[in-house]
Image (tube, helix red, strand yellow):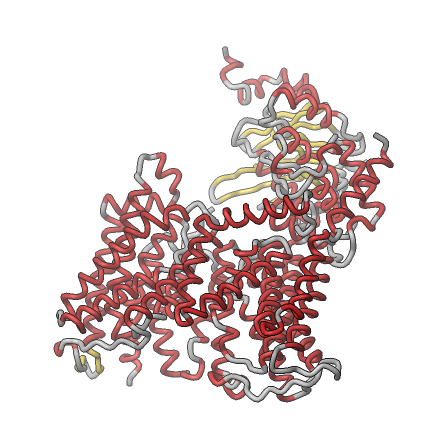
Amino acid sequence: MSTADLTARVRGSLVLARKWHPAEFVVWVMAAAAFVLFPRQLLLLNEIAILALFALSLDLIVGYAGIVSLGHAAFLGMGAYTAGLIALHVTADPLVGLVIGMAASGLLGLVTSPLVLKGNDLTRLMVTLGIGLLMLELANSLGWLTGGADGLQGIAMGKILGIFEFDLFGKTAYAYSLTVLFLLFVLARRIVHSPFGLSLRAVRDNPLRAASSGVPIPWRLAAVYTLSAAYAGAAGALLAQTTQFVSLDVLDFHRSADVMLVLIIGGAGWLYGGIVGAAVFKLLQDWIAWFTPQYWQFWIGLFLVAFVLGGREILHGGIRALVARVSGRRGGGS
Amino acid sequence: MTLLTILIDGIAYGMVLFVLASGLSVTLGLMNFVNLAHGAFAMVGGYVTVLLMQRLGVPFLATLPAAFLVAALAGLVLERTLYRPMYAKSHLDQVMFSIGLVFMAVAAMKYAVGSQQQIISLPSFLLGRFDVFGVSVGRYRLFVIVLCGLLALALFWGFVRTRFGSRLRAAVDDARVARGLGIPVTALFAVTFAVGSGLAGLGGALGVELLGLDPTFPLKFMIYFLIVVTVGGTTTITGPFFAAMLLGVADVGGKYFIPQAGAFIIYGVMVALLILRPEGLFARSRS
Amino acid sequence: MTAALETIGLIMRFGGITATDDVSFTLERGARHALIGPNGAGKTTFVNLLTGVLTPSAGKVLLGGEDITALNREARVKRGIARTFQINQLFGAMTPLEMIALVVSERLGEGGRPLARLDASPRLVEETADILARFRLDDIMDERISTLPYGKQRQIEIAAAFAAKPSVLLLDEPAAGVPEAERRELLDLVGSLPEDVSVLLIEHDMDLVFRFATRITVLVNGRVLAEGDPSEVARDPAVKAAYLGEGAHG
């Protein structure tokens, strides 16, 4: 085979890996169609979109860079409180709050990134858990700013772009959250398929070889941790703005654990894992809450245990088989 | 309240934490398994004491062995059935699995006994305070210090002097080599897990008065156990012991002198220590 | 002309053990140099000192005359030292194409660009294709690495090191564990590395050493016991005694 041929094949292969698969369009069309199909479920759909964004953020570090975290709620909370405070004290414009919320969380991610660069999985889990609890404690003790246990009340959001007003049924909320999710998803998709994204996968797969190939590991990890924090901040800001309320619950440990479960359900390391997981998780939660609202936590726990003990292989095997049947070729999401 | 009183309260608190967490440190060191559900066994022990006292009128002291036994039995059964397949999995899987167990335990306990704080009435000889050289000491705290101190000594002795202990240390040091030497690591672990869970149960029972008890106990104190283990390291028993003392005194002192900071100081110290000494404060370096 | 790689009085101590004991070593430009020695002779420590995994207790490492003793691993890779590992260190979840593209992209300084596209850089695509062709990986370039046979994985290991365009290439037992059937192709590849790359081969397999190397250094107990061309080293009585063991007496 000639060199030119091979060069063309290499390029073709690289293009194919990043191209949009038809099934991906279906996902987004369905998400948009839900707006019309389930007009009574828009509040739930809004929650799904926000959780999906939060899980996408976690996937960026867990699935693509191999950094495990048990304290991701710290960034969700940072974004939520920042957006809430901006709305209360500065401006009611949602987009301004969203951007500043992302920036604040990103900054927190950048500042704390040196702490997760060192050590193994175990120390990372402990350190992130510690940081998460630290943020909760901080929000609790800064009652003059955060409202303490009462939370931030009386948030009134302005119109998005001066046009779309938030309503009681979640119409604007879902459209807003879905749009933000989509835009950030497209950005994340671009990033994971870039040379930078490839180097993250290298670090996740084999740090020794990555370092021996010239990848400056600490810088790359710090960068993706910051990015992930900013994404979580966006999810927090959306949460604060669409519910017009922020409480200590956004920083609670169960948030970090839930989003981990979402990612485990959907599968880490492909960008749709967070979306699939969030939909399954929220629908399950909704369904279980319908007949046993108080003991939802028990079922979450049971799912976690069952998943890790073997249910995951069964579920993901099923999903893979389904995807293989539908598409007939390797998905472009990984 | 004098400084010395705070110190003694802190030591009593630290002693209970040590008994609660000692089992976790050995299981973490031995199987490299992150069991965040350790606190659930402590909660079981706590509720055994509470229910035996409230419903059956069993005297406090008599409930303590029961708390140990029930928690140990629960540990033994769960280790045999659910935990064992987890050893080969990643830390993340282990963490998610044990968080799942915690969630289940919390919700199940809420369902079974309700979510209110449990109060027990201690026997009269453990109530009140008395003066030792002008320092006011709570009777119950002194009782806890003596009992847990004896337990700690027994654990040191068992770990350092007995055949079981030397095998255990060898296995913690390098499980593969230990297996090669013919040490039954799996059986060793099952026993250690059960004893560790039992100790957690006993700690939970002793802690009802000092730490409080409600169904969220495993979540609330998870971080404390982890601090003891991560700061103390997993290769010795002395490490977690001193870490628990430090934590107990710092927490009691911190809450007394700077109440508005809450648990902030403790978490901050833990994160700082983990960064400075990821192998644990008292760990010997491994090369 | 300065040597490709040089060490001066290199010493590495671990506690009371001296793993590398005053090693002064020269790798000439374009050399095919083998480093041999019995197990525990300190070969791995020496390689780790060259690549920056370890920092020496004393002594210097010079690359093309430049002192690189204080540089870390990535900086040394950027300056032109690449290595393979005794045990494969691959990105198992990637394809050979992706793995080679990664190394090339890092060398071209693309790795820090989150919005760039891999296929948009003609140099990256061409050089990746070149390396895939040179190491005969083109027909399996889209398979998952972890599913490939061991011999192929070994080829990828060398290709990935080579993709960093090193002036000095360290091959740590490249043929170790490769089944006989796949061995020939691998040895051919090692033999056909371009002349301008200086190669240091760390090896147990005497067959491979004498076939490949034009110069041999013998390391025993962390010290250089002998150095010379293959026939000199083969005749050296000290080498026979220390390295070939009882065989020399019998």
Query: In this rendering, is residue A318 above or below A170?
Result: above
Residue B227 shown left or right of residue A284 in the figure: left
Identify the image quadrant of residue C12.
top right
Identify the image quadrant of residue B18.
bottom left
Residue B191, visible in the rendered structure: yes
Residue at (61%, 63%) from the top-left corner?
A57
Q: Nearer the viewer, residue A93 or C199?
A: A93
Residue C220: x and y, percent? Answer: 55, 29
Q: Residue furthest top?
A: C250
Q: Nearer the viewer, residue B31 or A162?
A: A162
Query: In this rendering, is residue B186 above or below A287?
Result: above
Q: Residue furthest front?
A: A37
Residue A105: x and y, percent? Answer: 62, 72
Residue A164: x and y, percent? Answer: 72, 81
Residue at (33%, 61%) from the top-left corner?
B21
Q: Quadrant of the N terminus of chain B?
A: bottom left
Query: In this rendering, is residue A110 above or below B183?
Result: below
Residue B144 shown left or right of residue B90 in the figure: left
Q: Nearer the viewer, residue A191 or B11?
A: A191
Residue at (72%, 57%) from the top-left corner?
A25
Identify the image quadrant of residue B281.
bottom left
Query: In this rendering, is residue C54 above or below A168?
Result: above
Residue C229, visible in the rendered structure: no
Q: Nearer the viewer, residue C133 or C217?
A: C133
Residue C107 shown left or right of residue C230 in the figure: right
Residue A70: x and y, percent? Answer: 50, 63
Number of on-image labels: 0
Residue at (36%, 82%) from the top-left corner?
B256
